[in-house]
Image: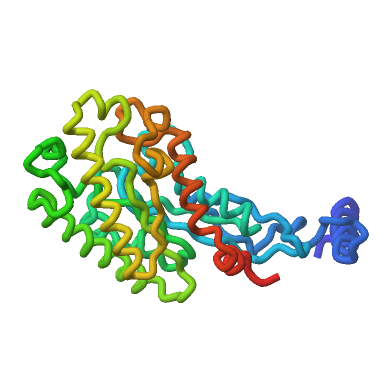
């Protein structure tokens, strides 16, 4: 066999010395993973990871990320905003509260109805996301309604009106099935599901007012009816109900949300999404929830 060149022998000896120093702690941060690459490193994914883990008060960092999944229509998808939507913002805020990183899968899509979300729960991609979910946010239902009848005085008052009764029943049953389907995928007892209502199921602010008083009254009545239905489903299924009405409209409904909506008057802008994320975190940030997500030290 041909003798190895001296410079190659020297290089190999040098690497051996560096590895020994790294393992012994003489050279901080230099170890097998630095020299060779970490074969156990997690593969890259297309999911958004937010809220990088920071040391907890005890000085330790719980291991592993937590998972948030968003389901619903164009509001949670934030596809028209050009901003960080409330789903992703919730992941960031919970990261700061729990000292854990959060992987966010936003599976919401513009124009989707309750039936669309229910159908999507059969897809392998969404099921894969839900299988490891710690928190699921669901906001859907506005697209279920024939909004051309919002200003029809024959549909006033909205509660009890034949104009909406069948759709309201479908919304209630659809949301109940969605929650049951999520639990069939993710069996963990500590999974949390949050259902969001709406500030308006159609346009609001200056855009809504331009359509007349009947439109303003009718859309507000229908929105309150939808929110009552979502709240009832949350109560009967053990989900968390998040009030999206008060942050943008005020508890009395007199706040003007124009500044928190895009020019279409239909979707939240950056400040609107911040208001929604604050409402979600406010409902979730109970001592027990944070403690459970904080994990063992």
Residue 270: percent from left, percent from top:
46, 34
Residue 189: percent from left, percent from top:
46, 76
Is residue 19 depicted above or below 111 in this figure? below
Residue for point 21% across, 57% down: 171
Is residue 119 depicted above or below 188 in this figure? above
Q: As drawn, is 78 to the left or to the right of 6?
A: left
- Looking at the rendering, in which quadrant would you find the C terminus? bottom right
Q: As drawn, is 286 to the left or to the right of 107?
A: right
Give residue 267's quadrant in the image.
top left
Give residue 44's quadrant in the image.
bottom right
Residue 287: percent from left, percent from top:
59, 64
Residue 9 appears in the picture as rendered: no
Residue 2: percent from left, percent from top:
82, 61
Residue for point 75% across, 64% down: 60
Q: As drawn, is 2 to the left or to the right of 191?
A: right
Residue 73 appears in the picture as rendered: yes
Residue for point 43% across, 42% down: 247
């Amino acid at each position: 066999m041909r003798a190895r060149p001296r410079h190659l022998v020297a290089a190999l000896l040098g690497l051996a010395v560096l590895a020994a120093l790294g393992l012994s702690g003489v050279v901080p941060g230099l170890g097998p993973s630095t020299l060779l690459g970490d074969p156990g490193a997690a593969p890259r994914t297309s999911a958004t990871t937010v809220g990088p883990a920071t040391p907890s008060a005890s000085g330790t960092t719980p291991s592993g990320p937590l998972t948030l999944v968003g389901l619903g229509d164009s509001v949670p998808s934030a596809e028209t905003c050009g901003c960080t939507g409330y789903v992703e913002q919730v992941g960031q805020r919970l990261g700061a509260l729990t000292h854990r990183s959060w992987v966010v899968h936003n599976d919401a899509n513009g124009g989707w109805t309750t039936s669309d979300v229910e159908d999507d729960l059969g897809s392998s991609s969404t099921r894969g996301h839900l299988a490891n979910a710690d928190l699921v946010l669901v906001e859907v239902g506005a697209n279920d309604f024939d909004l051309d009848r919002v200003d029809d005085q024959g549909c006033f008052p909205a509660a009890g009106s034949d104009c909406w009764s069948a759709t309201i029943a479908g919304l209630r049953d659809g949301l109940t099935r969605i929650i049951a389907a999520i639990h069939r995928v993710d069996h963990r007892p500590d999974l949390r599901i949050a259902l969001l209502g709406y500030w308006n199921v159609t346009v609001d602010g200056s855009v809504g007012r331009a359509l007349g008083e009947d439109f303003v009254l009718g859309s507000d009545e229908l929105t309150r009816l939808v929110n009552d239905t979502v709240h009832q489903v949350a109560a009967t299924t053990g989900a968390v109900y998040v009030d999206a009405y008060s942050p943008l409209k005020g508890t009395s409904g007199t706040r003007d949300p124009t500044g928190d909506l895009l020019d279409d008057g239909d979707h939240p802008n950056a400040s609107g999404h911040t208001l929604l994320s604050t409402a979600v975190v406010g409902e979730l940030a109970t001592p027990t929830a944070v403690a459970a997500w904080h994990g063992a030290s």
